[in-house]
Image (cartoon, helix red, strand yellow):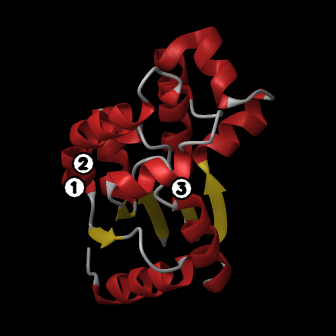
Amino acid sequence: MLVILIGMMGAGKTTVGREYARRHHMRFIDCDHEIEARTGVKVSTIFEIEGEEGFRRRETQLVDELTRESDLVLATGGGVVLNSDNRAMMSERGIVVYLNVPTPVLWERTRHDRNRPLLQVPNPRERIENLYRERDPLYRSVADIIVDGGRGNPGGMVRVIEKAIENFKK
């Protein structure tokens, strides 16, 4: 089984994904961390040198590779859904879980993080709201399961995901 977590930056994909993988004895990979491990530099550096386009190209190559695996929980970057090829690969190859978290919670979780290139703008709160408006329909279009988050703890979200996957037939 391949479980793919999508959602905005700060939604908890890494934390929830790591816990789900641990409970189910699956491998866990965070796309952004994997790109950093393979390139030897931070995502922010890739953005500086190659721009968002270069980063997205790397991301699509990785999504193509990793969505061919099984017994894997994959936490994607927030912008993975911007590419229609990524959406198709994720939808065809795994169970896609959208962690839907309200923008005020996303802002609280990310406002002190200097390693998020898309938030290095004069008004990062407004940027989060704009990104959410742009991406939410795309997340919903590819999601097999939508989990509303932002309140409670990661363990609670994992239990909701477990129950939803149990009841899910692709």
Kindly indicate whether the residue at mark 2 contacts the one at mark 3 (C-beta within 8 angstroms): no
Check disc 1: other Cα within 10 Å, few if <14, some if 14-19, many if 20+. some
Where disc 1 sits, the SS reads: helix
Q: Is residue 85 above or below residue 9?
A: above
- Tell me residue 3's x, y (percent): 47, 67
Earlier sequence position, callout 3 versus callout 1: 3
In the picture shown, does residue 23 fall above or below 50?
A: below
Q: Nearer the viewer, mark 3 or mark 2?
A: 2
- Residue at mark 2: 136
Residue at left 64%, top 25%? 44
Residue position marked by numbered label 1 in the rendering: 140
Count all numbered tags in the image, as a single digit. 3
Question: Farthest top residue?
Answer: 49
Which image quarter holds the C terminus?
Answer: bottom left
Q: Which residue is mark 3?
A: 75
Callout 3, which amino acid?
Ala
Percent position of residue 116, x then y: 57, 34
Element carrying mark 3: strand
Q: CA distance from mark 3 to mark 2?
A: 17 Å
Q: Identify the residue shown where x is 53% and y is 56%.
A: 75
- Looking at the image, tell me whether mark 3 or mark 2 is earlier in sequence order: 3
- Label of residue 35 in the image: none
* Residue 16 location, quadrant: bottom right
* Residue type, label 2: Asp
Q: Is residue 123 visible?
A: yes
- The span from disc 3 to disc 1 (Cα, nearest Å) is 16 Å
